[in-house]
Amino acid sequence: MTPLADCLAAVYPKVRLTLQSNMTRALGAGGLPFEVIAGVPAEQYGARVTFRPVGDPARLATAFGLERHPWGVPSWVGVRIASTGAGRVKPYHRLTRIDDRFALPAGLIGDLYPVAASLDGDKTELYLRCRSPMPWQTFVEATLAPLGGGEYPFAPWPCSRSDSFGFSMCWSGTRLQAVSLYAFSGALPDDFSIERQWASGMTEIDRTAYAMAITAVRSLGRLTRGKRHGLLAWTLERGAKWHRAASLRIIPTSS
């Protein structure tokens, strides 16, 4: 995992020691890394690697003090290192039905199903996918409506495919704070086209951080099929703050 830490710390060196320590802890507890998240602006996202458990999931949870989480043992955990070097972990739980923990806004699109949820301090996040195909613009307008909507840039522009759009809603306490839109690989062009369009307009720092994240995941395992970009995400926060991220797939054979 040292090359991964080196690559992800290329822009913000303070990330490296904390990231390496947390990844070593995750691997020692049977965790297997499956994605790197490369965000824009890079300074806001820092370094992010997500691990799933191999074997007993309680081992990975215990390694990060999550064994007594109010929702039970997490299904996977995200190691999140700020650009300043401060570290934390985000727990995720698989979800098969929506219950009274989540207050959904009125007027959402239909044919949704839950995928996961996260309770992280005072923040609750619900992740949903849409089975039916629809134009991306229709999906965007309906999903961002609870935060007032607006016109935002998307490149590459996702195409309409079944089960290829998703979104999450994040509440701070009971107040809806952010909505993230997801275009999964089935709605996206090839990796080369994604890289070219995704990097367009980036600052030099953001472009370098993105390129080094791609280098990192390529060093850990070669894809035999599918795209390296598992999904692209665009987030609108209350107050019209806009940022975006790419989930890059890691394909190691074992931890």
Image: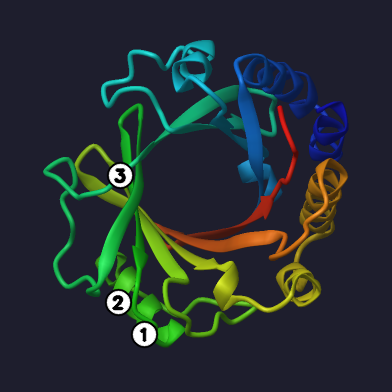
Q: Mark 3 or mark 2, which is nearer the start of the sequence? A: 3
Indicate the position of residue 62 as horizontal and vertical percent values: 47, 12
Residue indicated by mark 1? 138
**Is the C-beta separation of discs 1 and 2 under 8 Å?**
yes
Does residue 40 appear in this view?
Answer: no
User: Residue shown at 62%/44% (left/top)?
Assistant: 44
Give whichever of 3, 163 is nearer the camera: 163
Q: Residue 113 carries which label?
A: none
Does residue 172 appear in this view?
Answer: yes
Indicate the position of residue 70 as horizontal and vertical percent values: 26, 21
Residue indicated by mark 2? 142
Q: How crowded is mark 2: few (under 14 residues within 10 Å), some or many (20 or more)?
A: few
Q: Mark 1 or mark 3, which is nearer the start of the sequence? A: 3
User: Residue shown at 55%/80% (left/top)?
Assistant: 158
User: Residue shown at 49%/33% (left/top)?
Assistant: 76
Vertical position of residue 181 compared to residue 30: above or below: below
Give whichever of 22, 57 is nearer the camera: 57
Identified by mark 3, the residue type is Leu
Vertical position of residue 93 compared to residue 222: above or below: above
Identify the secondary structure beneath mark 3: loop
Q: Distance between the residues labelled 3 and 1?
A: 26 Å
Indicate the position of residue 139 as horizontal and vertical percent values: 37, 78
Residue indicated by mark 3? 95
Q: How far apart are marks 2 and 3 (CA)?
A: 23 Å
